[in-house]
Image (tube, rainbow, N blue to C red):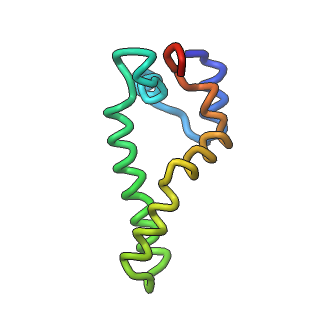
Amino acid sequence: MNPIVINRLQRKLGYTFNHQELLQQALTHRSASSKHNERLEFLGDSILSYVIANALYHRFPRVDEGDMSRMRATLVRGNTLAELAREFELGECLRLGPGE
């Protein structure tokens, strides 16, 4: 993985990754390698859901759980996350297999 691209990503995120090998795996689509991101994606989805649920719970103390569930679903849906990925230019960091 191109270190210049990774350094640019880290600057945009305001975060330096401690385990570069995990970062590479997280950015690797299953079409590109047998060591791909699907297990990390599962874990990340769970963490993202928790972080957003916790933030909504504390930020909106009078909102019921049904409304908070809908708010969380809006925030974690594919379109919203794709927009964030474009803002951070994650596409240039992804490792994809042929045809992806």
From this view, report whether residue 92 is shown above or below residue 48: above
**Which quadrant: the N terminus?**
top right
| Residue 19: % across, % down | 42, 27
Give the camera-side residue of 88 and 78: 78
Q: Position of residue 70 (x, y in %)?
A: 45, 69
Count of labels shown? Answer: 0
Instruction: Give percent across and percent down for residue 99.
Output: 54, 17
Q: Is residue 9 left or right of residue 36?
A: right
- Percent position of residue 16, x then y: 54, 34
Q: Tell me which residue sits at (37%, 58%) in the image.
A: 50
Residue 57, compared with residue 53, is above or below; it is below
> Farthest bottom residue?
62
The quadrant in which residue 67 appears is bottom left
Quadrant location of residue 66? bottom left
Tell me: 81 left or right of 20. right
Residue drawn where x is 66% and y is 40% of the image? 86
Residue at the spot 48% in from the left edge and 27% down from the top edge: 27
Q: Residue at x 46, y 66 (%)?
A: 55
Q: Quadrant of residue 33?
A: top left
Residue 11 versus residue 76 in the image, above or below = above
